């Protein structure tokens, strides 16, 4: 059995995070592609929530992308993808939580509203509020070029797939011009090898 085995779906931004983390760590892994719209009968035996990603490490199961990625960072510490000191680590976790509790929802709502003239203005306004919140927070983190500073972290990996969800880019063109730190970050991260090698496919 391969030491690391990832159940993934090419278009899933959550699974993409884990593929990016594995690439950033230089780890070899076996990959099983799951079509989440047509899951194999036994998939719930592998994934308790019925979702990807799921990682098997020496046969032990870990699920939920943010938890998998922090696990990988602890078990394979080089290069580190979380700050070492507790306060900065807490800040990183707050951003990761913001991504999943607010930003990703606003991003999905925008994607679902495209083409719906009634829902689109509200969805766009919500997404813009998120961009502005992020811009303020990123500026407090410093000039970058990464989210937290001068090296990549799980915060970059947590957010970046939401700028190319289901092969759409519900982000970059919509980021207000004055959100300069966020715009520069997306432009910079788009060239990252782990991002380019995990490009989303149209669902
Ligand atoms: N909170 C989960 C979300 C994972 C998720 O929603 N994955 C989707 C694909 S993008 C999935 O597997 N959906 C299948 C389903 O809900 O039945 C994580 O971060 O890992």
Image (spheres, helix red, strand yellow):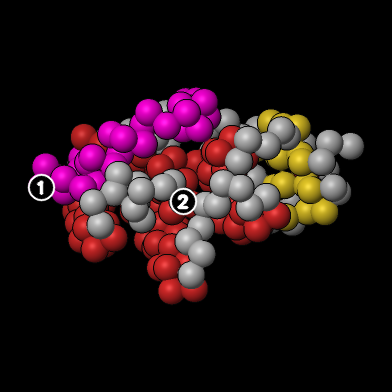
Q: Position of residue 107 (x, y in %)?
A: 35, 48
- The residue lying toward the viewer, choosing from 154 and 101, is 154
What is the residue that sits farthest to the bottom in this orientation? 87
Q: Which mark is residue 90?
A: none
- The residue lying toward the viewer, choosing from 15 and 154, is 154
Q: Position of residue 14 (x, y in %)?
A: 54, 46
- Residue 3, by quadrant, is top right
What is the residue that sits farthest to the left in this orientation? 178
- Which badge, 2 or 1, is on the more N-terminal residue? 2
Q: Position of residue 193 (x, y in %)?
A: 47, 28
| Disc 2: which residue | 153
Classify 126 as above or below 182. Answer: below
Say if the magenta span includes residue 181: yes
Q: Position of residue 21 (x, y in %)?
A: 57, 43
Q: Callout 1 environment at 10 Å: few (<14), some (14 to 19), or many (20+)?
A: few
Classify 93 as above or below 13. Answer: below
Which residue does the image show at 28% across and 34% down from the upper left? 187
Which residue does the image show at 42% across and 68% down from the upper left? 88
Q: Decide if residue 57 is on the left or right side of residue 12.
A: right
Q: Callout 2 environment at 10 Å: few (<14), some (14 to 19), or many (20+)?
A: many
Task: Say which of marks 2 and 1 sits in front.
Answer: 2
Is disc 2 placed on a helix, strand or loop? loop
- The residue lying toward the viewer, choosing from 57 and 12, is 57
Which residue does the image show at 22% across and 41% down from the upper left? 183
Is disc 1 placed on a helix, strand or loop? loop
Counting the numbered discs, the total is 2
Q: Which residues are magenta?
A: 174-203
């Amino acid at each position: 059995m391969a030491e690391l085995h990832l159940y993934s779906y090419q278009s899933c931004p959550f699974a993409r995070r884990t593929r990016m983390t594995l690439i950033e760590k230089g780890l070899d892994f076996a990959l099983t592609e799951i079509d989440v719209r047509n899951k194999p009968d036994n998939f719930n035996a592998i994934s308790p929530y019925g979702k990807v990603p799921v990682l098997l490490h020496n046969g032990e199961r870990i699920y939920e992308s943010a938890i998998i990625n922090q696990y990988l960072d602890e078990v394979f510490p080089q290069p580190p993808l979380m700050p070492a000191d507790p306060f900065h680590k807490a800040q990183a976790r707050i951003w990761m939580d913001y991504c999943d509790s607010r930003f990703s929802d606003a991003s999905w709502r925008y994607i679902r509203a495209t083409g719906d003239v009634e829902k689109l203005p509200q969805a766009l306004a919500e997404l813009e509020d998120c961009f502005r919140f992020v811009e303020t927070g990123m500026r407090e983190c410093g000039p970058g070029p990464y989210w937290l500073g001068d090296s990549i972290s799980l915060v970059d990996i947590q957010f970046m797939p939401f700028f190319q969800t289901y092969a759409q880019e519900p982000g970059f063109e919509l980021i207000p011009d004055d959100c300069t730190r966020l715009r520069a970050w997306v432009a910079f991260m788009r060239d990252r090898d782990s991002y380019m090698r995990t490009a989303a496919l149209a669902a």
